[in-house]
Amino acid sequence: MQKLGKEDYITLENLMEKVPDPNSTFTATGWHYELMALLGKFGYRPVGRYAAYELAVKLLELGYDD
């Protein structure tokens, strides 16, 4: 897993402010689908909203490359 560029990191960070933790919601929200689409643009293919959320959290923890 590689760090995102600064612009991609900020885009992901802004989206994650809106995406609810899938462990706290019963059904997927539109935000989860947007998250999966964004991760797809970054070259990742998470299967399901739980995997997408966990991947996004890990990417944000890595920080970004300048």
Image (spheres, helix red, strand yellow):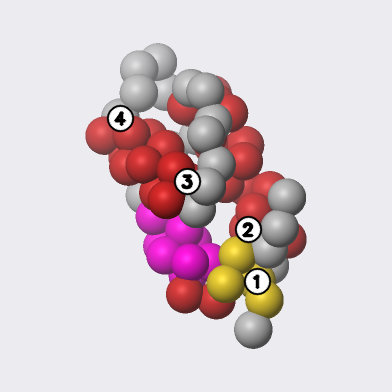
Cβ atoms under marks 1 and 3 closer than 8 Å = no
Name the residue carrying label 1. 64
Name the residue carrying label 2. 60
The amino acid type found where label 2 is placed reads: Leu
Cβ atoms under marks 1 and 4 closer than 8 Å = no
Disc 2 versus disc 1: nearer the observer: 1
Disc 1 versus disc 4: nearer the observer: 1
Q: Earlier in the sequence, mark 4 or mark 2?
A: 4
**Alpha carbon separation for disc pair 3 and 4:** 16 Å
| Magenta range | 8-15
Which of the two residues, 33 or 28, is positioned nearer the viewer here? 33
> Does residue 64 lie above or below 55 as drawn?
below
Q: Is the magenta stretch mostly helix, strand or loop?
A: helix
Query: Which label sits on residue 39?
Result: 3
**Alpha carbon separation for disc pair 2 and 1:** 8 Å
Q: Which of marks 3 and 2 is nearer the N terminus?
A: 3
> Does residue 50 lie above or below 15 as drawn?
above
Residue 31 at x, y = what percent? 32, 40
Tell me if I can see residue 61 in this picture.
no
Q: Residue drawn 42% across and 23% down?
A: 25
Name the residue carrying label 4. 29
Cβ atoms under marks 3 and 4 closer than 8 Å = no
The residue tagged with tag 4: helix, strand or loop?
loop
Residue 14: say if magenta: yes
**Alpha carbon separation for disc pair 1 and 3:** 15 Å
The amino acid type found where label 3 is placed reads: Leu
> Does residue 57 lie above or below 63 as drawn?
above
Residue 20 at x, y = what percent? 43, 38
